[in-house]
């Protein structure tokens, strides 16, 4: 007999399969509607018509688009997503080379944003209606409204160019080869500005939703009972109210992971971070259809997986969701 959480996970898996197929289909056809001929890019400057025809036949570009899609789908089922037109390497080999850098940046940004956002949201709810609460709400609204590319460029101008506190681009020092703990410090120093840029949007969103959920939880009867029993304010906030409000926080984190991953594209371009975002940009610029399709599909599966984990976490926190 399956547990309620296992049944929930199976339902989410069943919904994920058609969703992935829809994403692949939409991405495949949308990319091919974009202007530009990948065969012409591969052929170089002033290619002959015969050479262009040879490249189109080699990569299957001379086939109808539906035939190209069926051929791609047949290979994708077996785990073969083709070869990058630019690097001549298997698509997933190229993606997996860049994925750790993106995980490092986005994962750190989400952890930082979650911790600070929860603390700020709880503090704001605890002082609801006070000047401090109004200031926090105004600051979170401002942070939510600022575009990531503008924040990133501003941080570069102030802290990299003006004050020279942090490096402006890259993941590690270009003129030095550090090892061991020194290498960890170097990477961490390069992460400060991009992680700050990426975490700002998610932090403000988590703070706002946590505040709203906490205010609602603090108005419940069980909080009044805990206060009547003489429970401390800290225990009421974290043990009673936040245990119920955290479901909202976990849901927001899961839902916004896709936005964080999309924001990583802009942030990686601004800071020259060698991750999936930069790979997306290069694949679009070079009309590398196999790599772009594989990157979209890989990112979609990661977002779906994170949301499944979020659903399971919410079910473990709130038994009512397990039904």
Image (cartoon, grey):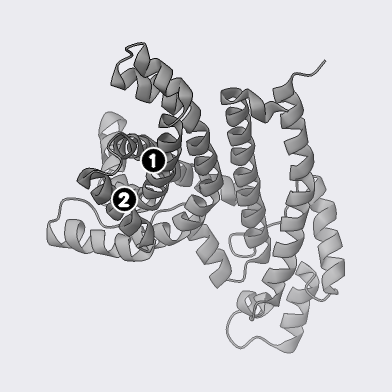
Q: Which residue is mark 1?
A: 211
Is 243 displayed left or right of 72 in the figure?
left
| Residue 305, image quadrant | top right
> Do callouts 2 and 1 mark residues in contact (Cβ within 8 Å)?
yes
Say few, some or many: other residues with alpha carbon within 10 Å of mark 1 (under 14 / 14 to 19 / 20 or more).
Answer: many
Location of residue 279 with respect to 314 vertically, above or below: below
| Residue 310, image quadrant | top right
Badge 1 element: helix
Query: If you read the primary sequence from the N terminus, does the residue marked by circle 2 or circle 1 appear first?
Result: 2
Q: In this view of the protein, which residue sits in the foreground, 48 or 157?
A: 157
Q: Percent position (x, y) of residue 152?
A: 31, 60
Location of residue 148 with respect to 32 vertically, above or below: above
Q: Residue at x 54, y 39 (%)?
A: 251
Q: Residue at x 39, y 54 (%)?
A: 273
Q: Residue at x 40, y 37 (%)?
A: 215
| Residue 160, image quadrant | bottom left
Q: Quadrant of the N terminus?
A: top right
Is 244 displayed left or right of 141 in the figure?
right
Furthest residue toward top? 229
Q: Which residue is mark 2?
A: 137
Location of residue 94 with respect to 50 vertically, above or below: above
Q: Residue at x 80, y 69 (%)?
A: 60
Location of residue 30 with respect to 221 vertically, above or below: below
**Is residue 89 among what the camera can see?**
no
Q: In this view of the protein, which residue sits in the foreground, 36 or 195?
A: 195
């Amino acid at each position: 007999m399956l547990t309620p959480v296992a049944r929930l996970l199976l339902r989410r898996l069943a919904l994920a399969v058609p969703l992935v197929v829809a994403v692949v289909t939409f991405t495949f056809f949308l990319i091919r509607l974009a202007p530009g001929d990948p065969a012409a890019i591969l052929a170089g400057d002033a290619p002959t018509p015969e050479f262009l025809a040879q490249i189109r036949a080699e990569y299957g570009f001379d086939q109808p688009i539906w035939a190209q899609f069926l051929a791609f789908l047949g290979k994708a089922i077996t785990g073969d997503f083709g070869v990058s037109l630019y690097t001549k390497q298997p698509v997933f080999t190229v993606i997996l080379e860049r994925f750790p850098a993106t995980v490092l940046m986005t994962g750190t940004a989400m952890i930082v944003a979650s911790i600070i956002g929860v603390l700020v949201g709880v503090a704001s709810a605890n002082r609801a209606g006070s000047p401090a609460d109004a200031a926090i709400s105004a600051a979170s609204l401002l942070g939510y409204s600022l575009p990531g590319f503008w924040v990133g460029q501003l941080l570069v101008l102030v802290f990299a160019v003006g004050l020279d506190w942090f490096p402006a681009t890259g993941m590690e020092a270009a003129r030095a080869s550090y090892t061991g703990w020194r290498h960890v410090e170097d990477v961490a120093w390069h992460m400060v500005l991009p992680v700050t840029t990426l975490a700002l949007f998610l932090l403000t969103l988590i703070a706002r939703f946590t505040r709203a959920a906490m205010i609602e939880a603090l108005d419940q009867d069980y909080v009044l009972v805990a206060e009547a029993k003489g429970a401390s304010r800290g225990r009421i906030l974290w043990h009673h109210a936040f245990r119920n409000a955290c479901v909202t926080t976990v849901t927001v984190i899961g839902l916004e992971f896709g936005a964080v991953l999309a924001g990583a594209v802009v942030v990686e371009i601004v800071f020259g971070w060698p991750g999936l975002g930069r790979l997306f940009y290069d694949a679009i610029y070079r009309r590398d259809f196999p790599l772009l399709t594989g990157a979209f599909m890989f990112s979609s599966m990661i977002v779906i997986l994170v949301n499944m984990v979020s659903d399971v976490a919410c079910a473990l926190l709130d038994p009512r969701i397990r039904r």
